[in-house]
Image (tube, rainbow, N blue to C red):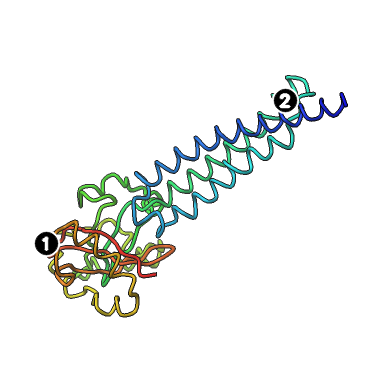
């Protein structure tokens, strides 16, 4: 009976240690999630550009694996030195995994949404970092987060050759070449003819109409045909960006 009591007490202490680890890990996870949603991957880019995929990996390491390892290795019969070593190894592994995950998420966060040829494309931070370009400089093109930018197709022969050289030699697509960037507002009238037909979208995806209603109401737009709609291509899914006639960004709908 005494042995069973001791065993129950040890199990209780192990679960308490794992629970404490879980609470700390959950707090760190929620902080990371807050940063992702509010700064790195604002809607709709959390779902379209990899924020959701990344946060699931962080959750599996931070909230699940770390506390589980503590539950397995924690033994109150061990000396303080042994326990400190065990928990230290787990914490080190967890921190390294979090740093790797955080760095990956930071590098893949969208720093620009660029209109090229017929639609918008998200540009990850890593694409700018690889070119040695400071992504903060993109703020001069737009006050939106991330900035909405127009990439101008070269009209001069020398500029066209430069663009093609960067594509072939450096493997950088046009929408990721900052020297082509221009303020979207200055070219918005040029892209109007390339807008999507919202009736065709609703015919294929009836749920879009329900998504549109709150956005249009928020901006006091009574007729859905008063807004302009453009395709957004992202790493994990595509969507539709809404603008008013003056080029002001209104919101986003997901046809899927």
Q: Could you tell which of marks 1 and 2 lies nearer the N-terminus?
A: 2
Q: Could you say whether the residue bearing mark 2 is in a helix, strand or loop? A: helix
Judge the density around disc 2: few (<14), some (14-19), many (≥20) Cα neighbours within 10 Å: some
Residue 196: image quadrant is bottom left
Residue 169: image quadrant is bottom left
Q: How many numbered circles are shown? A: 2
Measured as percent of width and height from the top left, residue 48 is found at: 40, 60
Between residues 65 and 5, which one lies in front from this camera angle?
5
Quadrant including the N terminus: top right
Measured as percent of width and height from the top left, residue 45 is found at: 36, 56
Query: Residue, x 55% and y 50% (percent of image)?
Result: 57
**Whole-number angstrom distance, CA of label 1 to CA of label 2:** 64 Å
Residue 123: image quadrant is bottom left
Marks 1/2 in contact by CB < 8 Å: the verdict is no
Query: Residue, x 31% and y 69% (percent of image)?
Result: 208
Residue 83, which numbered label? 2
In the image, is residue 33 above or below residue 120?
A: above
| Residue of label 1 | 246
Q: Could you say whether the residue bearing mark 1 is in a helix, strand or loop? A: loop
In the image, is residue 47 above or below residue 225?
A: above
Locate residue 112 relative to residue 73 in the image: left or right.
left
Query: Residue, x 21% and y 65% (percent of image)?
Result: 152
Residue 124, which numbered label? none
Q: Of all residues shown, which one is farthest toward the top?
A: 80
Measured as percent of width and height from the top left, residue 215 is found at: 23, 60
Query: Residue, x 34% and y 75% (percent of image)?
Result: 205
Between residues 171 and 247, which one lies in front from this camera angle?
247
Judge the density around disc 1: few (<14), some (14-19), many (≥20) Cα neighbours within 10 Å: few
Measured as percent of width and height from the top left, residue 39 is found at: 35, 44
Quadrant including the C terminus: bottom left
Between residues 62 and 154, which one lies in front from this camera angle?
62
In the image, is residue 175 above or below residue 117?
A: above
């Amino acid at each position: 009976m005494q042995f069973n009591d001791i065993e129950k007490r040890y199990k209780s202490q192990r679960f308490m240690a794992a629970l404490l680890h879980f609470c700390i890990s959950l707090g760190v996870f929620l902080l990371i999630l807050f940063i992702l949603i509010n700064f790195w991957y604002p809607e709709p880019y959390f779902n379209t550009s990899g924020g959701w995929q990344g946060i699931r990996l962080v959750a599996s390491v931070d909230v699940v694996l770390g506390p589980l390892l503590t539950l397995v290795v924690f033994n109150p019969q061990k000396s303080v030195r042994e326990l400190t070593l065990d928990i230290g190894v787990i914490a080190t592994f967890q921190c390294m995994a979090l740093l790797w995950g955080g760095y990956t998420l930071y590098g893949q966060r969208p720093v620009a949404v660029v209109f090229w040829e017929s639609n918008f494309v998200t540009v990850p931070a890593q694409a700018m970092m690889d070119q040695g370009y400071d992504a903060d400089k993109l703020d001069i093109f737009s006050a939106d987060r991330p900035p909405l930018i127009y990439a101008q197709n070269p009209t001069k022969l020398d500029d066209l050759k430069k663009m093609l050289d960067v594509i072939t030699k450096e493997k950088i697509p046009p929408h990721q070449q900052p020297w082509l960037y221009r303020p979207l507002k200055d070219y918005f009238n040029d892209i109007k003819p390339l807008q999507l037909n919202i009736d065709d979208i609703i015919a294929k995806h009836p749920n879009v109409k329900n998504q549109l209603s709150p956005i249009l109401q928020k901006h006091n737009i009574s007729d859905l045909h008063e807004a302009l709609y453009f395709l957004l291509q992202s790493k994990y899914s595509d969507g539709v960006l809404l603008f008013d006639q003056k080029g002001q960004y209104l919101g986003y709908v997901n046809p899927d």
